[in-house]
Structures are given as structure tokens and as C-alpha cells.
Image (cartoon, rainbow, N blue to C red):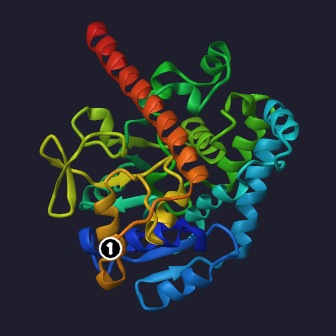
Amino acid sequence: MDGIYILANDYVYDQLVALLNSIETNISPTMPVCILPYDDHLDKVRSLIAARPQVSLFENHDSIQRWEQFATEAWQSHDRAQKTWRERELPTVYRLAMHRKLCCFDGEFDQFIYFDADTLALGSVAPIFQKLDDYDWVTNDYQYSSDLKYIFDGSQADLLNVFTPETLKNIFCAGWFASKKGVFTDEILRSLLDSLKSGEADLMALWGPDQSLMNYMVLRSQISYYNFASTGTAPGSHWSSSFEQQDHVLYDKGQRLMYLHYMSVATAHFNRLCQGEEAQIPYRDLFLYYRYLNAPESRPQHFKSPDPFTQARSHITRFYQQKMGNLNYRFRKLKQQLNKTQL
């Protein structure tokens, strides 16, 4: 059986409602969906899925414990991460709960697509499931054209001792991917942990730990991999791009987006917006459309201004995000030009 996994809790409730509504509208109203629990704050989530027979809650606690243990062993082998996190008074594994998305490999779906909760589904995923007939891992994002340091920040020499330059072109965003149940066997996982503990853990970047670890797992294990975006013809998916909106979906140069990812846009902005407070969110009306698709009467009609402190913090966050988005865009363009020159 094919299906979709989403990592969520009550804090991302508004985003989860929008995502589920967008899946039902743009993929299928009967598409099976399983919610992976980020933590135990799930009262609103349970109430939400009670009226949706196609949506379930992942409750395999042995699987959750298994993958958290795997992630803990992996990151405890990363001396630099442990030192940095300890100095900042962070937990032994920063954002450990994000690694619960690895429970996908133990779940009920033989083939699956994983969505972060800060996503909207906007188009058919049939091509993704078709590719899974031939590949173990399928993505559709342009992370490969961004700076490698967001995934692996070890020295170039150390990286090339483990990965080929061609392999490093396959880095991906862990907020959206597709794979198969059981693709990481016990033997593969033991081998990966052995390699991590031998010193390879230090290759991984610290501040998106689930993304760094998953990239390491996929690229180091050399399971078969396909990225639609690497063809250079797939539409984008990141909110920082300029897309055309039509009939509540988005288009990139005439191509319909498969999904829109609000990566790095704080959940607090969405929560304040749904409480009737002004919040600057890219494609805001699109998000509100899906959030209140089944309850339009509850959609806020007027938005009050936030308090001065919240306004200042939002301005600083938007400035930083815009600068980083611009820098990443320029870097991708430069890299594409250099690649064409080399060809």
C-alpha cells in the first residue's frame, strides 16, 4: 500500500490542517496518511484525524525508541557537535524528535512520501510512486544546488575520502522525500553506525541534524537514488521563489508545482495568522485557503497588528530570510553557469 507520512504535533495544528486539506484536494481524498508524533502533545491532532478515516496516528513506540536510539548513537559519535551543543546548553542530540521521521521505514506503507508539516500539496504525486518502482529513494528539490555546508561541513579532503564528487551532487532536503519500507536493513544500519563511530560522523553539519544524518545514510549506503529536480526541468518548491498562482495552485514557468515548502518560516507566524494577527507569510492567501477550506466561516477576516516586540522580531527574521534566500539564489545561478561552462 502507498501512503504519505507527516511529522506533527498540536503546535503545528494549523499547518497540519492546511496540508491535509491540500492532500485531499490535489492528490486524492482517499490517499492514506499517517501522522508521526513529534511528541506527546497530540490532543488536537487526534481530534482532527478522528473525522478522517484515511488518516491514522503512528503508535509504534518500539520503532520511535529504535530510531531515537540510532540517532543518539550517531550524534554522540560527533565530538564537535557534542562540544558545541554542550557549550550552548542544548540536549545531547539537538532536535532529537525530528529524527522520528525515520519511523517511515517501519510503518504500514510499502512505498511512501514524507511531508514536513510546513508544506502544501499542490499536484499529483503519481510520478513519484512510479519512480519508486525503479529507485529506493526519490526526491524533487534543488537542495543539491545550494551550499554543501548545510548538509556536510567536514573538510573537503575528509568528504572526498568518503564520497565521490558525483555522489555529493545528490544532497537533498529532508523535508520532502519518498522511499520504501525497510530499505535500511539491520545490516546497513550496523554498517552505517560503524562508519559514523570510526570518525565519519564529523562530516555532518550540526544545525539540521535530521537532514544531515539522513543525507549521510542515503549517500553512504549507496541505495539507488533519483531526483526529478536534477534534470533541470522540474518546477521549484521553496517559498522564496516567485511562482504564479492560479485556481489555488502554483506554477513555475507554466509547470504546476508538486508541493510548496515553507521551510524556515516559523510556525509561530502561521499560528498568529490563524488567531487573527497580522503575519507576513509568503503565499499567505494560498495557505489560508487550504487552512479554512472546510470551515470558511472560521477564517479570520481582519488581522490586528502584533505588539511592537513581535513586530521587531518579525522584521529581523524576514530580513535574515530574504538575505539568505537571495544569497542561495545567486549561488545556484552561479553554480548552474559554471556547470554549463564545464560542459
Q: Along the line of sight, which residue is nearer the eye, 136 or 252? A: 252
Instruction: Please tell me whether residue 294 is drawn above or below residue 210 in the rendered image.
Output: below
Q: What element does badge 1 sit on? A: loop
For the question of whether residue 294 can be seen, the reply is no
Identified at 31% across, 85% down, the residue is: 297
Q: In the rendered structure, which amino acid carries the disc numbered 1?
A: Gln
Identified at 56% across, 61% down, the residue is: 182
Q: Quadrant of residue 258?
A: bottom left
Instruction: Judge the density around disc 1: few (<14), some (14-19), many (≥20) Cα neighbours within 10 Å.
Output: few
The answer to whether 87 appears left or right of 68 in the picture is right
Residue 93's x, y, as percent? Answer: 78, 48
Identified at 54% across, 36% down, the residue is: 219
The quarter of the rendered structure image containing the C terminus is: top left
Q: Along the line of sight, which residue is nearer the eye, 221 or 81? A: 81
On the image, numbered disc 1 is attached to which residue?
Answer: 301
The answer to whether 253 appears left or right of 51 in the picture is left
Residue 287's x, y, as percent? Answer: 34, 63
The answer to whether 197 appears left or right of 42 in the picture is right
Identified at 55% across, 80% down, the residue is: 45
Instruction: Please tell me whether residue 150 is drawn above or below residue 226 in the rendered image.
Output: above
Residue 186's x, y, as percent? Answer: 68, 55
The quarter of the rendered structure image containing the N terminus is: bottom left
